[in-house]
Each structure stands twice: as structure tokens, then as C-alpha cells.
Image (cartoon, rainbow, N blue to C red):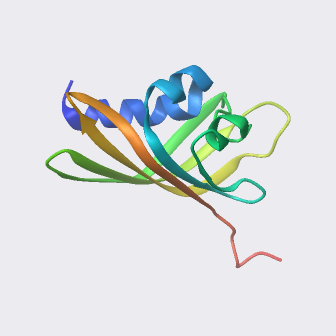
Amino acid sequence: MTTDDTLWDLEERFWTQGADSVRQATAKGAVFVLPLPAGILQGDALWREKDVAQRWRSVEMSEQYLSRKDDIAVLAYRISAERSDEPIYEAFCTSTYLNDDGKWLRLAHQQTPVWDTREG
């Protein structure tokens, strides 16, 4: 598996696995920016916020981009995520990873929900 494949696999697990998986793949001091009401989260607030470790039944990533320089990688993509009893969630996302002694850890994550301004 290439480094790029590893990073995309980590990112998909962020969406589909639980809080323990997210915590293990997150750097100390990480910052997440999520849609309201969560907002900007850092430190212990990450683990108190239910939106951080939501499990999605299925996810589809598209418009994927990856930029890597030394021990830093930035992933940008569009997500379409689905789970029971909720509408499909669509967002533009970025995640920044740091290679910390051979282990990729998420340092930052941001989501911008997609709204089709052509509707309604």
C-alpha cells in the first residue's frame, strides 16, 4: 500500500469507525472545524462532541486531492455520507496529517456542508 493509499484509508476510517479509531489517529492538540452547533473544537472538546466520531453506514469520497510535503499531507475531497434515519450528508472536507515517527496522525479536519444554491 502506498503512502497516498494509507492516508485515504485513514480518512475513510475517520467516517466509518468509532471514537476509539478516531482518537488513535488524531494528534495531540488537533483542531477540528465542524458545522454548527459543534464549531471549532480542540483538546478534550473533541471527545465530548458527538459529531466528531459519528459512524456512517456508507461514505463516498469524490473530487479527491492530496498534497504532500515531507511529513505533512493535506487531503481535500467531497464526501457523501449516509446513515440510518438521516438525510445524506454532503460536505467539502480537508484533513491535514502529520507523520509522527512513522505514524500518520490527523492534525486538523474541516467540513463545509454543501448546499445547492440553485434550489428553492
Q: Is residue 115 above or below residue 102?
A: below
Q: Nearer the viewer, residue 42 or 52?
A: 42
Q: Residue at x 32, y 36 (%)?
A: 7
Q: Is residue 117 above or below residue 49?
A: below
Please state the horizontal and vertical placement of residue 50, each as a whole percent of the image.
74, 37
Q: Residue at x 66, y 29 (%)?
A: 55
Judge left or right: residue 1 versus residue 27: left
Residue 49 occupies which quadrant of the picture?
Answer: top right
Q: Nearer the viewer, residue 55 or 53?
A: 53
Please state the horizontal and vertical placement of residue 16, each as a whole percent of the image.
58, 28
Please state the horizontal and vertical placement of residue 2, each as a whole percent of the image.
18, 30
Q: Is residue 113 above or below residue 97?
A: below
Q: Nearer the viewer, residue 95 or 114?
A: 95
Judge left or right: residue 111 versus residue 64: right
> Which quadrant is home to the N terminus?
top left
> Which quadrant is home to the C terminus?
bottom right
Q: Residue at x 20, y 27 (%)?
A: 102
